[in-house]
Amino acid sequence: MRRLFFFLVIGGLGLAVLLSLGIWQLQRMAWKDELLQIIETRMAAAPVAVPQDPSETQDRYRAVTAQGELGAQELHVFWVTKEAETGYRVISALVMGDGRRLLLDRGFIPAADKASSRSSGAISVTGNLLWPDEGDWSTPAPDVDTNILYARDLAYMANRLGTEPVLIVARSLSPETTVTPQAVTTAGIPNNHLQYMITWFSLAFIWAAMTASFLWRSRAKPEG
């Protein structure tokens, strides 16, 4: 009897843990759906002027428009497109009429065009503010000699180009340039919580069935 009670407790605890993980993923799924809705709403809104003191919490993904002069210096961030094309994202300084200097992600160039000259001068941009969450401890440090970065590090880029740590990712540029804008989308934001929720609830069902079967067989043995 004590043995059955022990396995009943273990089975109950295991079921409680698995169910709680499933419920947690259900809550996370609701949170992620709401977050994606907020992002899509901000991205689809009419562009506004870049705030004077933008906040990552309040202004991430906000649609903005700006005019200014492109700085001649570029930073190149190693990139692979969805079509598996290797190249670089071109980051330049955008010097606005009031003297503000912001970072501008102009878009993508193929690897073969890295050394090509690109136009600078007056430009108008429509895009979205972004605080990239890229790179980790394994990301290589920027290679200053070859001018190659492996993540869009705002602090590093702002220091190199003498700008505020504020990044506009272009979705359109006027006049158009040889750089292809790579607009911000929600495609890179994972939302796998439904899959995780189904996994945890499935494991909970299996655990409950196995526990019930074990307890039934254990009780049936003495009776037999």
Image: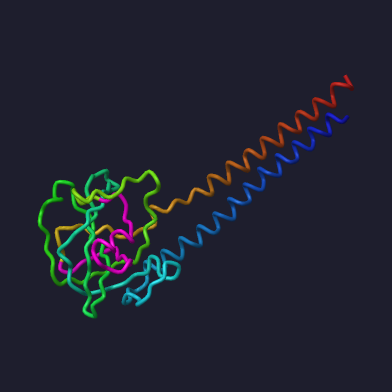
Is 116 drawn above or below residue 222 in the view shown? below
From the viewer's perspective, is 197 left or right of 35? right
In the image, what residue occupies the spot 15% across and 62% down?
Answer: 177
Q: Residue furthest left?
A: 117
Asked whether residue 162 is drawn in magenta, I would say: yes
State the residue in front, 30 or 98: 98
In the image, what residue occupies the spot 42% across and 54% down?
Answer: 189
Horizontal and vertical percent position of residue 156: 30, 58
In the image, what residue occupies the spot 88% across and 19% down?
Answer: 224
| Residue 215, quarter of the rendered image | top right
Horizontal and vertical percent position of residue 75: 22, 57
Q: Residue furthest bottom?
A: 98
Q: How was this image coloured? A: rainbow
What segment carries the magenta color? 149-175
State the residue in front, 135 or 172: 135
In the image, what residue occupies the spot 14% across and 46% down?
Answer: 112
From the viewer's perspective, is 193 left or right of 130? right
Asked whether residue 160 is drawn in magenta, I would say: yes
Horizontal and vertical percent position of residue 48: 33, 76
Q: Quadrant of the N terminus?
A: top right
From the viewer's perspective, is 9 left or right of 56? right
Horizontal and vertical percent position of residue 81: 27, 48
Q: How many marks?
A: 0
From the viewer's perspective, is 194 left or right of 215? left
Is 15 drawn above or below residue 215 in the view shown? below
